[in-house]
Every structure is written in C-alpha cells, then in structure tokens.
Image (spheres, rainbow, N blue to C red):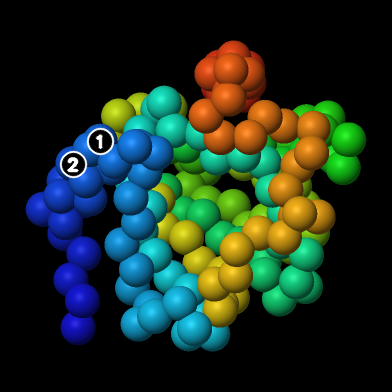
Amino acid sequence: MKIINRQLLDELTSAAQGSPRLRRNWNIHPDDTFPAHRLLNAMEPASYIRPHRHLDHRKDETFMIVRGRLGVIVFADDGTVREAVLLDAAGDILGVDIPSGSFHSAVSLAEGTVFFEAKAGPYLPLAEGEKASWAPEDATSETAAYLDALKGLF
C-alpha cells in the first residue's frame, strides 16, 4: 500500500521547488503504460502549463486539490476563456473533471500547492493538434506575461 501523508507532500513540494519547471509528480500508478493514471502533482506559482487538450475520447482529466490553491481554466478553441474555477483546499470547490477535447490549463496560486490528477493511460506526449497554437510555448519571452494574465482570472 502506498501511503500519502504530509511528509510526502512536503518532499514533493521541495522537489518541485528545485525543479526547472517548478513541478513534480508522484505516480501512484505503476508505470506509464498502465491504463489508469493516478498521481499527485506538486506545482509552484511560477510554473507554466501550456494550454492543451487530450483528443482521445477516453482521456477526461480529473483534478482534486490536496493542499493550496489551484486555478483551472478551460478555453474555447480560439483561446477565449470559457470557464475559470478556483480549487482551494480550504474552500468549497475541491475538484473538477475536464472533458476530453477541451483546451485547459492550471495555475498554482499558492506555494506548496499539490493536487491529485487522474486520467486514462498510457502516457503519450502531446500531438501538435493537442497543443494550443494561440498560447506561448514554455520558456519564451511571452510566457511570464501570459501566466500572469491567467492568474489574474482568480
């Protein structure tokens, strides 16, 4: 049995803070080929997840906040914000389920944020049609301003 406790959350947060992408996941599923992916994701406020979608109809994605605050954004195909939901471990909204095919992103709004993520496996890198062409790529000159605008939704 795998135990999820505060020490694990602290270790995961520390690893995220030391990571170039300011994120670290801890897989509960045994490997990337497993049909059901379940993981904890530690994410710091300066971490950027480029909006993307999962075109495989089996890849709905569920997020549940464990610690901290996470903003989840769903976009129309042209990049217009359709919905922005705040997940707060001390609040009323604790989770969301994002339908496959929906462009989405998440932003950490507090240091030490950790969320549980579940979706169908196996892991496959995003295809070009799954990346939002209207959003900046990672680590470009536009990334910081775009991330700030996303955080501004909350």
Amino acid type, residue under disc 2 in the picture: Ser
Which quadrant would the C terminus be assigned to in this image? top right
**What residue is shown with label 1?**
17
Q: Is residue 104 above or below residue 154?
A: below
Picture residue at 56% right of the left edge, 60% below the top: 62
- Left or right of 13? Residue 73 is right
Q: Is residue 152 visible?
A: no
Mark 1 residue crowding within 10 angstroms, few (<14) / some (14–19) / many (20+): many
Q: Are marks 2 and 1 in contact (CB under 8 Å)?
A: yes
Q: Nearer the viewer, residue 53 or 134?
A: 134
Picture residue at 41% right of the left edge, 26% below the top: 46
Q: Position of residue 32 (x, y in %)?
A: 45, 77
Q: Is residue 31 visible?
A: yes
Secondary structure beneath dot 2 equals: helix
Q: Position of residue 35 (x, y in %)?
A: 54, 85
Secondary structure beneath dot 1 equals: helix
Indicate which disc residue 14 carries.
2
Q: Position of residue 28 (x, y in %)?
A: 33, 73
Picture residue at 48% right of the left edge, 85% below the top: 34
